[in-house]
Image (cartoon, rainbow, N blue to C red):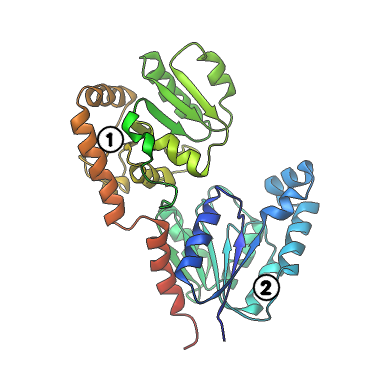
Amino acid sequence: MTSQFLYIGPYSPGETCRMRGERLKELLPDWDFQVVDTRISQHESSHWSVSLGWRYHIGPFISKLNRFVLNSLTQSKYEIIWVDKGIMLTPRTIEELRKRAKVLVHFTPDPAFLYHRSRFFFKSMALYDFLITTKSYEIEQYHSAVSARTRVLYATQGYEEAIHHPYENASEKQSMVFIGHHETEREKILQYLLDHQVPVKLAGINWEDFCRRNERGTLTFLGERVVADAYGQAISGARYSWGALSRWVPEKHTTRTFEIPACGTALITEHNEEIDQFFREDEAIFYRTPEEMLEKIRYYDTHLDELAELTVRGQQRVINDGRSYRAILQRLLSEIMTKLPQ
């Protein structure tokens, strides 16, 4: 009889959840792989109810989302149910998934304790067999919240091979690109670069005021949402891309940390204990201050051969270290399969 895999999460194009789901499907070619796209209920709900649901986890959208998930269950039993970013699924919904799953998995690339906190998730954590996080700084909190029956797994962020790779425009590389939401510290560094005539391409939300102030300078705004191939092309077409870490949480690395080198572009990143393990000094461009970042950009702008060599080494490092979603998920599946009855 065919094994059943149910994948629950936001499955819109460009979502990292979809990238993970598509790779899991490839890794399980003989399984019946079903998807419950939680974005569908969002598209069919009013803006105010979605906003209320995301912000406070209350209101009609939450009820609609959970009904949608429960009504989408077509099997009485699944070998594996994988919940991706399940912070708005109620304990009642997770209890029903628990009854139907031989193995129940939760994965999130987001901080669950310091940000994106959810009373639903906290109340249902112990129902899962596996809790997978990409946040090393939250592992102790996960362990404190559940018994030894629930296994806590750590995985780094990753890149999607079908999107994050060099594109044809790579031969015309120029400028520096950053794709990400606005934060005050990010604005300060980008403003410093622009004030020193470094061409910057920028994409992301809440940059309107910043763009207005710099409309006569060397800034190019690519739009609020640059996803899928357009995202890969934007990074691949730049000499450098900034792997900025958020200051909202104690972030140690991000998807950009691996997506940028995978696109065949030089990663500009700050030092910390995690990133220092991922790359050597000749595989990424490290900085400690904006002044050092500018100094290194100017150096490599006049030493393009060295830049090309560093970029190739950085790309090879993420490939060799298995930072693709395919490789990461293969390792996770190996752990998860040990829980299935033989």
Residue 57 x, y percent position in the rendering = 71, 52
Where residue 140 sits, quadrant-wise, is bottom left
- Residue 236 visible in this rendered orientation of the protein: yes
Q: Is residue 277 visible?
A: no
The tag earlier along the polypeptide, 1 or 2, is 2
| Label placed on residue 95 | 2
CA–CA distance in space, label 1 to label 2: 46 Å
x and y, in percent, of residue 150 in the image: 50, 73
Q: Nearer the viewer, mark 1 or mark 2?
A: 1
Left or right: where 268 falls relative to 37 = left
Q: Residue furthest bottom?
A: 342
**Can you give x and y, in whole percent of width and height, for residue 325 in the image?**
42, 57
The amino acid pointed to by label 2 is Glu
Relative horizontal placement of residue 223, taking residue 317 as reference (left or right):
right
* The quadrant where residue 17 appears: bottom right
Which residue is painted at 43% across and 64% down in the image?
329
Q: Nearer the viewer, residue 32 or 252?
A: 32
Residue at 37% of width from left, 44% of height from top? 257
Compared with 187, 280 (above or below) is below
- Helix or strand or loop: what does disc 2 sit on? helix
Position of 228 compared to 95: left or right? Answer: left
Label of residue 260 in the image: none
User: Outermost residue, front direction?
Assistant: 168
Check the image and report above or below for 130 versus 290. below
Asked whether 267 or 153 is in front, the reply is 267
Mark 1 belongs to which amino acid? Answer: Phe
Q: Which disc is residue 286 wearing?
A: 1
Between 280 and 39, the one lying in front of the other is: 39
> Helix or strand or loop: what does disc 1 sit on?
strand
- The quarter of the image holding the N terminus is bottom right
- Horizontally, residue 8 falls left or right of residue 271, namely right
